[in-house]
Amino acid sequence: MQEIKLVLQEKTFFLIKTMMVTTYAMPVVSEDSTGQDLPLLPPNHLSLSNLNFQTQKKHHQNLTEKLLSLIKQCKSKNLLKQIHTQMPINSIPKPNFLLSKIVDLKDLAYASLVFNQLTKPNIYAFNFMLRGLATTWKKYDFCVELYYKLKSLGLKANNFTYPFLFIA
């Protein structure tokens, strides 16, 4: 059994445990304040074939909400990287939410890595990278290059895009 604690502001919000049963990885979420385990998969079920689809979807949605909530409250690069690690493991494809927090934490290398891993970056992702390049990291030439990349992909700039270009 492997455990990963996610600690935020000296309080453990939840524990993600990975339990291996046959060949399936089954994450379980528990909240420390109540001590009650909230399984992502229903108890007493040892294979995915026995799962109720709606129950699985509901628990996956709860896990997604908790991880996104932790991202919003995150104040540490290391904690953010732990949360990011859990997202693909639990099939949570929301890296755009990470970009805004990474820019707030002023980590250019990590922001670039996450941005470059996006298969189809949207205008939201571009705007956060433009904001970081123009205001946080003062990389004006990269800001203009990124704008040209946005245009080459056929995306349309919006009212959040242009202020950062004017700064650059």
Image: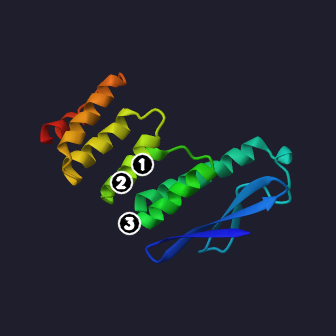
Q: Quadrant of residue 41?
A: bottom right
Q: Earlier in the sequence, mark 1 or mark 3?
A: 3
Packing grade of label 3 (10 A; few <14, some 14-19, many >=20) is some
| 125 to the left or right of 82 | left
Residue at image position (24%, 47%) is 133
Question: What residue does disc 1 label?
Answer: 113
Residue 75 circle label: 3
Question: What residue does disc 2 label?
Answer: 109
Residue at image position (30%, 39%) is 127
Where in the figure is residue 134, as x and y percent of width and height? Answer: 20, 46
Q: Amino acid at mark 1?
A: Leu
Where in the figure is residue 111, as x and y percent of width and height? Answer: 37, 50
- Which quadrant: the C terminus? top left
Where in the figure is residue 82, as x and y percent of width and height? Answer: 52, 62
Q: Earlier in the sequence, mark 3 or mark 2?
A: 3
* Position above or below: 40 against 75: above
Frontmost of labels 1 and 3 is 1
**Residue 152 visible in the picture:** yes
